[in-house]
Amino acid sequence: MKRKGILVVVSGFSGAGKGTLMKNLVKTYDNYALSISMTTRQPREGEEEGREYFFVSEETFKEKMGQDGLIEFACYCGNYYGTPREYVETQLEMGKDVLLEIEIQGALKVKKKYPAALLIFVMPPSAEQLKKRLAGRGTETPEVIEKRLCRALEEAKGIESYDYIVVNDDLEMCTRELHSIIRAAHNAVGRNEEWIENMRQELNVLVKGEK
């Protein structure tokens, strides 16, 4: 019996390295599909349309919202972010584990719509390391870095809503840990109710001759 994929929601503070972690997961292991979010923010240097994000106008984004074409959406630091529905549901039906990189507001909305979703929060080794990573990007002003740290303080209050945390200190080690968590989640009883019921029916046929 072919099992559906798991919707894996990965969140973390800006600068925790969640994007790099997820790309490494997809590169290292099969059976993952990385969902591409839609956003109204401007591309950063090196980002490409359709690879990191779908970059759209606010008008286009709101049209998609009105058509129920987004699984979730949220406003973060003055820009809209959302997850296109069609791609995600198609990949899940194919048995792919779909990775969503979204912030905490969106993650909790996804959990309400998809109760079987797996929520994972990526942590830095320390707050000081987080600040160094943000500064090391070289793409943000000190004011923006301060804004992101303030946002991280707010987000830290919601981490208990997640199923697991992973500490992104060593990229390869963290990638293996994330993969192991997702593999184990496939065997959770709550994600295998249909398979379990089929097994019961097959046993009934063998033992009692009942269908």
Image (cartoon, rainbow, N blue to C red):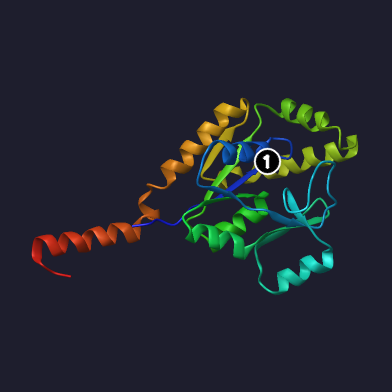
Which residue corresponds to mark 1? Answer: 19
Residue visible at 44% across and 57% down in the picture: 4
Which of the two residues, 71 or 36, is positioned nearer the viewer here? 36
Query: In screen coordinates, is 110 left or right of 150?
Result: left
Q: Quadrant of the C terminus?
A: bottom left
Q: Quadrant of the N terminus?
A: bottom left
With respect to residue 51, does 126 lie above or below?
Answer: above
Query: In screen coordinates, is 163 left or right of 56?
Result: left
Q: Amino acid at mark 1?
A: Gly
Q: Position of residue 196 (x, y in %)?
A: 29, 57
Which residue is at the far left? 208
Q: Quadrant of residue 127?
A: top right
Q: Position of residue 205 (x, y in %)?
A: 14, 64
Q: Position of residue 90 (x, y in %)?
A: 54, 62
With respect to residue 55, does 131 lie above or below?
Answer: above
Q: Position of residue 183 (x, y in %)?
A: 44, 42
